[in-house]
Image (cartoon, rainbow, N blue to C red):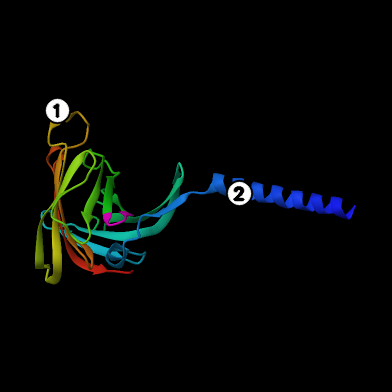
Amino acid sequence: MVKLNSYIASGLVICFALLLCNCTKTKHRDYVELDNDSAIIKHYNFLPGTYWIYRDVFSGRTDSFYVRNNYHTEQAEQYTLYNYHFITIAEINTDNTNPGDSANWIFDYEGVQVMMEYDYTAYVYGWKNQIQFKPLFRYPFLYGDQFSRYDTAALTQIDSSVIVNGLPFYNVAHVYHEANPDPSAGNNITKLQDMFYLNDSVGMVEISLNHPDHGINRDWRLIKYNIVR
């Protein structure tokens, strides 16, 4: 009887080990941390409490941008688990020039590159537009065309120092962005020409939007900011 019990116990141990192996094999996924570049996190990981206030040089209107949330989310694809890092920024018109005209901006951190998506949800100017391209920039800043979807972004110039509304900034990258310059492409993306001026201490010091098809022409320049990391 003792010998029989020993056989039974051994069999249970083997079955449990096989079951554990099978479970581990079916549930295992390689984990990919998409914001694992220390330089990106050091300079561009903006937390709630961060805000930027810009004034448009064309209209004189004042708009505020603030970090609504900063979060990670996991997405499984086959045997890989991706950890995406998003920072959502809300834009509001703070001087009541046109409070209905607002937007959401999202920074998506993926390793050494950052994709920026901005989505205008108001129809105040009779338009609604969402443009995605990645990356907006790679850090450390690199010259030349940046990989993108449906549009083109290129880092054209880096200024060692600039002054915006009396505020000094250093290492400012000029990123030119255009979408659907060829109407025959038929991808239904609004034609636009934008310029973003990026600094590695506060983010965007100037945002220039030129959307001729919808009469949008802005040049936001930073007048005040508070950065929380």
Position of residue 182 measured from the top left corner of the image (x, y, whole percent)? 12, 33
The residue located at (19%, 37%) in the rendering is: 190
The amino acid type of the residue labelled 1 equals Ser
Instruction: Let me know if residue 49 is in the magenta part.
Output: no
For the C terminus, which image quadrant? bottom left
Asked whether 171 or 49 is in front, the reply is 171
- The answer for how far apart the CA atoms under marks 1 and 2 are is 55 Å
Can residue 21 be seen here?
A: yes
Q: Residue furthest front?
A: 3
- Name which quarter of the figure residue 181 lies in: top left
The amino acid type of the residue labelled 2 equals Cys
Position of residue 192 measured from the top left corner of the image (x, y, whole percent)? 15, 42
Q: Which mark identifies residue 21? A: 2
Please, what secondary structure does the residue beneath circle 2 have? helix
Q: Nearer the viewer, mark 1 or mark 2?
A: 2
Position of residue 36 measured from the top left corner of the image (x, y, whole percent)? 35, 60
Asked whether 14 or 25 is in front, the reply is 14
Q: Which residues are magenta?
A: 109-113
- Name which quarter of the figure residue 57 lies in: bottom left
Instruction: Let me know if residue 112 is in the magenta part.
Output: yes
Q: Which mark identifies residue 184? A: 1
The residue located at (60%, 45%) in the rendering is: 22
Compared with 74, 42 (above or below) is below
Please, what secondary structure does the residue beneath circle 1 have? helix
Compared with 107, 164 (above or below) is below
How many numbered marks, from 0 up? 2
